[in-house]
Image (spheres, rainbow, N blue to C red):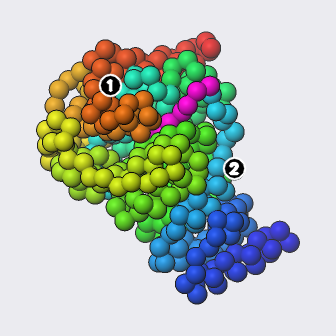
Amino acid sequence: MKNEMGGMMMQTYLQKLMAGNHLSVDEMTAAARILCSGEATDSQAGALLGLLALKGETADEIAGLVQAIRERSLPIKKTRGSVMDNCGTGGDGSKSFNISTASAFVIAGAGIKVAKHGNRNISSQTGSADVLEYLGVYLENTPEETQELLEENGIAFLFAPYVHPAMKRVMKVRKDLRVPTIFNLIGPLTNPIELDTQLVGIYRRDKLQIMGEVLKRLGRKRAVIVNGAGHMDELSLAGENHLVILDEGELNSIKLHPDEVDLPTYSIEEITGGDAERNARIMMSILRGDQGPFRDTVLLNAGVGIFANGKVDTIQAGIQCAKESIDSGAALSKLEFLIRKNERMKRGVV
């Protein structure tokens, strides 16, 4: 009976979408609950995702889906103080190294708590989970362990498939469709921790403003949404970057070129990554202070992340904080703490 009712409700939402109408937040939340509970058939799930993509997803529809997914996430309580994330959507096809992952440790080294949300390689060669696992970071921490890491270390990694078990129900449909859907947009938004601030990279420039509206609905105090030169889901040193800044409920759009913040320009090919081993070497070289395009790319992304958090008033000041985080060894120490924690767990030592 429950499955039949869910299927009937889903049919109503599909008919509305087929007529070219948008779903409200409540309607999308209800539809997503049906998806995540397994009450919808694969055909209905595929139709929902396809119709949303064809019409173009609205801020209400994205926010509704995020709400339903977060309802079913592992219950990780917010720690003392503000917490941010700097996860991107992926999907830009740039084959770059793990920019946001390296930047997360630099941001944490600057004294900002980071709940780094991430996954394995879905649209890139190596996902954040792949490179961290290669380095010896444990991926499946309990909610209590995650809270402890945030308090002790100022950064914890939240492995998306582990913290969102309900997402497994739609994975088959997404793989069968083989086209981008609303799920390709929401990864950075589904962090189960109540974030205060956020840096979001997105591979679709046309969704910058909509993502800003979604973050506003989700209650972020401050946020920066970026689409880089070459349409990367990170800030790029290859040219002009497009940013939307959310501050005190207001959204403002700006453009940013590396010249404006005294950073050199590099082609996207100069920051190409590879497998987990190569990307781990790149990340360690950055955190150990090696100069070059990898470091400068992280300085820009971490600097904007620090600015998004509100720790500084300008992006230039954020980049300076990022330099100090690396050069002082603070950023590297954040990663080393996670690796040591994993080693203690293997030995059965808390």
* Residue 177: x %, y % from top left: 48, 70
* Residue 277: x %, y % from top left: 31, 33
**What residue sits right under mark 2 in the picture?**
72
Tag 2 secondary structure: loop
Res 158 → quadrant: top right
**Which residue does the image show at 62% across and 25% down from the upper left?**
80
Side of 320 where 139 appears, left or right: right
Kind of residue at disc 2: Arg
Segment tinted magenta in the rendering: 80-88
Kind of residue at disc 1: Cys
Q: In this view, does 24 lie above or below 262?
A: below
Q: In this view, does 348 lie above or below 273?
A: above
Total numbered badges shown on the rendered structure: 2
Side of 135 where 93 appears, left or right: left
**Which residue does the image show at 64% across and 84% down from the upper left?**
15
**What residue sits right under mark 1 in the picture?**
321
The earlier-in-sequence mark between 2 and 1 is 2
